[in-house]
Amino acid sequence: MVRKIQERTTPFGKTLTDLRVSRGLTQTQIAKMCGMAQSQWQLYESGTKVPMIKTLSWIMKCLHIEGDEKARLYEAYMREGDVYED
């Protein structure tokens, strides 16, 4: 019998994943572009961790996020509740 593992994510993690995938990038590729470990990126996508606002700004630059996509990601980020300014 195969047990289905429930995926744990948040609106922010899901939005971040969707934006990365829409650009045809792997977690390893985008993490390298943003200067972080793939494991850190995975924590953001899974909803385990939320980046600081400065890091979020850097992620938006790395993914070339603008306009509606930027608003969508920022809205999902703000819904996380525990966000920190750095």
Image (cartoon, helix red, strand yellow):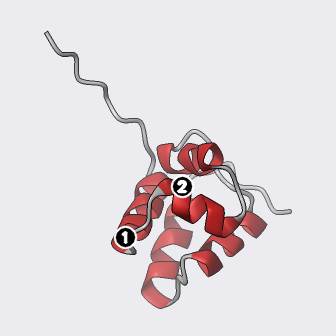
What's the mark number on residue 24?
1
Residue 38 appears left or right of 3: right
Residue that protrudes farthest toward the top in the picture: 1
Quarter of the rendering containing residue 83: bottom right
- Vertical side of 16 occupied by 3: above or below: above
Residue that protrudes farthest toward the left in the picture: 1
Which residue is disc 2 drawn over?
A: 28
Could you say where residue 1 lies in the image, as x and y percent from the top left?
A: 13, 9
Residue 82 appears left or right of 86: left
Residue 72 appears left or right of 6: right
How much space separates mark 2 and mark 1, taking CA atoms?
12 Å
Amino acid found under the numbered disc labelled 1: Gly
Could you say where residue 59 lies in the image, as x and y percent from the top left?
A: 63, 70
Q: How many circles with numbers are drawn on the protein? A: 2
Residue at the spot 70% in from the left edge and 56% down from the top edge = 36
Residue at the spot 42% in from the left edge and 69% down from the top edge = 19
Could you say where residue 37 lies in the image, as x and y percent from the top left?
A: 67, 50
Residue at the spot 50% in from the left edge and 70% down from the top edge = 73
Mark 2 neighbour class, 10 Å CA radius: few under 14, some 14 to 19, many 20 or more = some
Q: Secondary structure at mark 1?
A: loop
Q: Residue 46 or 10: which is nearer the viewer?
A: 46
- Vertical side of 69 occupied by 36: above or below: above
Amino acid found under the numbered disc labelled 2: Thr
Mark 1 neighbour class, 10 Å CA radius: few under 14, some 14 to 19, many 20 or more = few
Q: Secondary structure at mark 2?
A: helix
- Vertical side of 52 occupied by 69: above or below: below
Quarter of the rendering containing residue 52: bottom right
- In what quadrant of the picture does the C terminus appear? bottom right
Residue at the spot 31% in from the left edge and 29% down from the top edge = 6
Residue that protrudes farthest toward the bottom in the picture: 67
